[in-house]
């Protein structure tokens, strides 16, 4: 759960990548930004908004990969990308199902019902055009599964970067903008 300083540091690294014409690749696995009073006093909301703003206008390709839990603005702050991939068993949402059910029904025990309504699975998010690709997770030995996922991710990242590198900087920014403008339109499968 990052603090405001973490997002500010991330922005500095992303701008440095842009300066040297390097792609930005983020891995998302967070319940969200740290919700403490100190973080709010140091500008948590502003840091998240600034990160999203800066990522939106970066002139280099950006790929974000949801590898575990991606929740709240804390995840989106590092998820404004040309392409968003997601491991098939990861989740990506506005907040946790427990938080959602507590807000909606004043009953945190209804988290399973909330999770259904939230559409936070990789398949749901692919259908809604929130993510671009689902990375399969094989069953079996942990190390073997890990190696298989790493191999799949490497292949997808390389293929996607080869495609994005053919675009002009203006096209990279424009396509990222269009991606986020069209999010939520149901995709026929």
Image (spheres, rainbow, N blue to C red):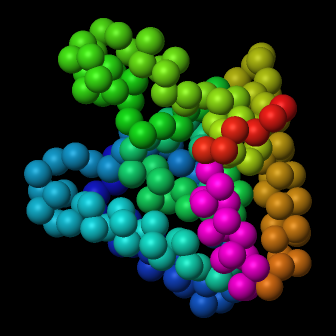
Find residue 161 and report its horizontal and vertical position in percent. Answer: 81, 67
Main secondary structure type of the part rendered in magenta: helix
The residue lying toward the viewer, choosing from 119 and 152, is 119
Q: Residue at x 54, y 56 (%)?
A: 79
The residue lying toward the viewer, choosing from 41 and 149, is 41
On the rendered image, what quadrant is the C terminus found in? top right
Q: Residue at x 86, y 52 (%)?
A: 155
38 relative to 188, above or below = below
Q: Residue at x 88, y 59 (%)?
A: 159
Q: Is residue 11 left or right of residue 100?
A: right
Report if residue 127 lies within the magenta region: no
Report if residue 181 lies within the magenta region: yes
Find residue 152 and report its horizontal and vertical position in percent. Answer: 83, 43
Residue 138 visible here = yes
Q: Is residue 51 left or right of residue 153?
A: left
Residue range of the region highlighted in magenta in the rendering: 169-183
The total number of labels drawn is 0
Q: Residue 165, located in which quarter of the rendered image?
A: bottom right
Residue 65 visible here = no
Find residue 160 and report its horizontal and vertical position in percent. Answer: 83, 61
90 relative to 13, above or below = above
Q: Residue at x 42, y 19 (%)?
A: 114
150 relative to 43, above or below = above
126 relative to 27, above or below = above
The residue lying toward the viewer, choosing from 149 and 144, is 149
Find residue 88 and report its horizontal and vertical position in percent. Answer: 70, 30
């Amino acid at each position: 759960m990052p603090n405001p300083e973490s997002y500010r540091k991330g922005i500095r690294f992303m701008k440095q990548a842009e300066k040297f014409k390097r792609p930005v690749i983020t891995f998302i696995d967070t319940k969200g930004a740290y919700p403490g009073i100190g973080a709010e006093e140091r500008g948590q909301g502003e840091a998240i908004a600034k990160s999203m703003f800066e990522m939106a206008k970066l002139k280099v390709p950006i790929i974000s990969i949801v590898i575990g839990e991606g929740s709240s603005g804390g995840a989106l702050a590092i998820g404004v990308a040309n392409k968003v991939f997601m491991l098939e068993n990861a989740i990506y949402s506005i907040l946790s199902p427990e938080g959602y059910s507590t807000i909606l029904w004043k009953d945190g025990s209804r988290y399973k019902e909330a999770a259904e309504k939230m559409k936070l699975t990789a398949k749901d998010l692919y259908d809604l055009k929130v993510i671009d690709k689902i990375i399969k997770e094989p069953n079996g030995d942990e190390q073997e599964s890990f190696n298989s996922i790493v191999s799949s991710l490497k292949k997808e990242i390389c293929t996607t970067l080869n495609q994005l590198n053919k675009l002009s900087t203006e096209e990279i920014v424009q396509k990222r903008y269009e991606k986020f403008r069209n999010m939520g339109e149901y995709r026929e499968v």
